[in-house]
Image (cartoon, rainbow, N blue to C red):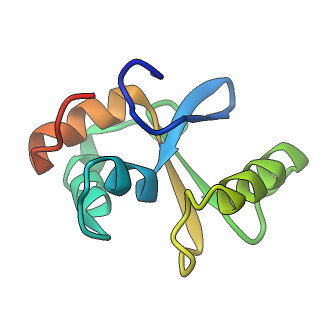
Amino acid sequence: MTDQFSEAPFEYRGEPVLGLRQIDRMNGAAKGTAFRAFKRVRHALQEDREFFVVDIDAPGDAKSARLMGDMKEAGALYPASRVAVLITAEAYARMQGVARLPAR
């Protein structure tokens, strides 16, 4: 995934992932562009395999809490977000087609 993305991915459950803010930032896109693309392909994605949703304020376990802290510190999350949608390379590939996001 590091070859596909210009933003440094984080790791979640053994998978390299990016947050939606990172995707917007690496594509020079307006806030919400990645989220809208995600919503358009959500029906075709498998949660807990191609994407993950983590409650930012109550992540559920210590590893997730550390990840949310690391992502906040790196500016990888939008400040007003309540959940982090973590995107794998497979999900990003599907999002590229609907939002015309460049291949990375």
Residue 55 image position (x, y, % from top left): 66, 64
Residue 24 image position (x, y, % from top left): 33, 56
Label count reads 0
Residue drawn 86% across and 50% down? 61
Residue drawn 39% across and 34% down? 6
Residue 44 image position (x, y, % from top left): 26, 39
Residue 33 image position (x, y, % from top left): 24, 62
**Of 27 and 84, the residue lying toward us:** 27
In the picture, measured across the screen, residue 73 lies left or right of residue 85, that is: right
In the picture, measured across the screen, residue 59 lies left or right of residue 96, that is: right
- Residue that sits furthest to the top in the current view: 3
Quadrant where the N terminus lies?
A: top left
In the picture, measured across the screen, residue 37 lies left or right of residue 68, that is: left
Q: Quadrant of residue 100?
A: top left
Q: Quadrant of residue 84?
A: bottom right
Quadrant where the C terminus lies?
A: top left
- Residue that sits furthest to the bottom in the current view: 80
Question: Is 16 situated above or below 75?
Answer: above
Question: Is 80 situated above or below 68?
Answer: below
Question: Is 61 situated above or below 6?
Answer: below
Residue drawn 30% across and 49% down? 42
**Of 76 and 64, the residue lying toward us:** 76
